[in-house]
Structure formats: C-alpha cells, structure tokens
Image (cartoon, grey):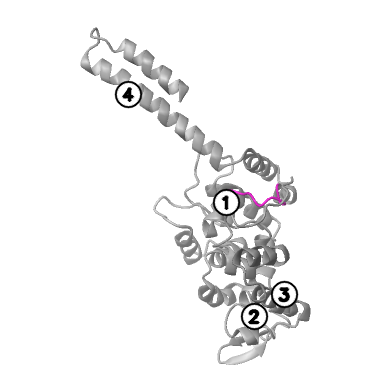
Amino acid sequence: MLVYLVAVAVIKKLSDDSLTYNEALKYQMYPNYILLFAMMLGVGSVSESPDVYHYELKTERLILNRDYKAAAEVGQKSLRTTARLTQLRMYALSRQGLLAERIFEYPQHYASFGLLNIADTMFYNRLSSQDICAYLGAYCGKNVKSSQQYYQLLFADSLANSQAADYYLCSLLLDKKLTEFHKQLPRYYNLSDSVPGAYDKLPKAYREALLLIGNPDFAQQGKLVVGTDTIAVFQDSAFVARFKQYNEKKIGIFNEVERLNKTHREFGKTYWWYYDYSHLAAGELAPQNGGL
C-alpha cells in the first residue's frame, strides 16, 4: 500500500498541464497496475505456503531425474498440498505401477482435477500435463475440454495403455462415480471365475471402492452383487474385517468434527474415508507435522 501511495503522488506531480490528455491518462493508470500486481503477489503468498511450493519443485526435479520413489515421498507427512503437487505425486506413483494401490495415501482435495489437469500447460512447468498425456498414450488436442473427454478419445482410438486405464478408473473414484467405476472395471481387469481370487488381487483403492457398492450388510461380509447373484468375492478376511471396523467407528462418534478427525487417524488413507468425508475435510482436520 505504501508503494501505491508513493506512486500516486509521483504520477500526480507529473500529470500537470504540460501533458496532453492522453499522456496524463496513461500515467494515471500506472498506480492501478501497481496495485493489481501487488494484490496478485499477496494472494499467491497467502494461498500457498513456502513449504508446499518447495515440495512442488523438489518433486518435479526428482521426477525429471527418474527417481519416482523419492518423488512420491516428498512432503508425504504433511496435509498441505496443491493441485499441481497432487498431480506430480500421482504421476510418480503411476511410474512405479502403484497409482491405484496408494492414491488415497495422499491428501486429495481436487477430485480428478488433481490427477490430470489438461489445462496445465504453463511454460514454467518443466513437466506439464501434455507430458503426462504422452505417457498415457497420446498428446491432448486443443479441442479437448476435460480429462474425461481425453480418456474417452484415448480409448476410442486404441491409443491408451495400462497406465491410462488406471488413470481413468482412479478419476472415476476421485469424482465419486461409483456406478460408472463398477461398470468400467471389468473392461480393464479380468474378474471372471476363471481367475482364482481375482477380486483380492485388485489394487487397494478398487477393492475398497467395491465394498461401497450395493447392500452394506453383504459388503461387510465381503459379498457383492454380480449380475443377479450375491457372491463372496473377497477371501481376505482381514480386509473385510477392517471395513466393518470403519463402519463401526464412524457410527459410534456423534460429533461431526470429532468423527472426521478420529476416523481420519485410523482410516484416512482409505477410499472409504475419502468417499464419506473428503467434502468436509478442508480446514477441519487437526494439523499434523509436515516432513520431507
């Protein structure tokens, strides 16, 4: 504000009768530009803390050095994140074949936008969304307006790879489109009876999502409705028992904020918690220590 006032005084002194109307008008606009620039800097400094910006830079550098494991570990203990940082982390997981296994171990505040933002083409990003699209099978065309449209075109043209399949399925989970996820899953994973333990072999996020579909009483027994039949699809008793514990935990706590925090401590890295509470989580979770 002090800079702005000084600029106004200087410009006012310059804008005397010796200047033409157009020249005076031009000079008088400068303080507005200065104020706008200062406001932009202020918003940036408030919205993103220095440690998160540091996480972004370090994660990107490690990815470019192909150290994907280390990249995925940057700032992992912190609840702070940005859409850009989330996108980088998910890419690092995918490079290790762990996207659908570990996606909900990280804060997810941006739905599928934090997985792939096709509008992210800023020149200062050394790793852009176009690079990620190329990794998934093809660059994104200028006429593509959303990541979902991009996935559809990718599969329609038979350009998608296995990584793209997980990106697409995870985007459905992030947007909480469980019905569509349930419909699409068998197209990319063989869940037929000819594959023993097919459901237990699915990545963690997919297994957790399936238990949220259909009759909750059946789900707590590891059963799903497949076609017209109710069958036991999960043989992993510990996994099914954990889902039952989650439901018992959230039912037993009546205060919403307390329930949010206590369930997060034990189940915050599950799709169950994300599906139930992610829309309430911003600003309500108790702070945790950050770390690199």
> Of the residues under marks 1 and 3, which one precedes in the sequence?
1
Task: State the residue at coordinates (29%, 20%).
Answer: 26
Residue 135 within the magenta-colored segment of the rendering: no
Residue topped by disc 1? 132
> Which secondary structure is most common in the magenta stretch?
loop
> Of the residues under marks 1 and 4, which one precedes in the sequence?
4
Query: What type is the residue that disc 3 sits on?
Result: Lys
- SS label for mark 1: helix
Region of the chain picked out in magenta, as a range: 75-82
| Cα–Cα gap, marks 3 and 4 | 64 Å
Query: Can you tell which of label 4 and label 2 is closer to the viewer?
Result: 4
Between 269 and 230, the one lying in front of the other is 269
Query: What type is the residue that disc 1 sits on?
Result: Ile
> Residue 36: image x %, image y %?
41, 31
Q: Are the residues at dot 1 and dot 3 in contact (C-beta closer than 8 Å)? A: no
Task: State the residue at coordinates (24%, 7%).
Answer: 18
The image's mark for residue 191 is 2
- SS label for mark 3: loop
Quadrant (top left/top right/bottom left/bottom right) for the N terminus: top left
> Of the residues under marks 3 and 2, which one precedes in the sequence?
2
Residue 79 within the magenta-colored segment of the rendering: yes
Residue topped by disc 3? 201
Residue with the most extreme top position = 18
> Of the residues under marks 4 and 2, which one precedes in the sequence?
4
Query: What type is the residue that disc 4 sits on?
Result: Met
Residue topped by disc 4? 29
- SS label for mark 4: helix
> Residue 199: image x %, image y %?
68, 79
Between 128 and 52, the one lying in front of the other is 52
Q: Is residue 3 above or below residue 286?
A: above
Task: State the residue at coordinates (59%, 59%).
Answer: 281
> Pointer 4: residues within 10 angstroms few (<14), some, or many (20+)?
few
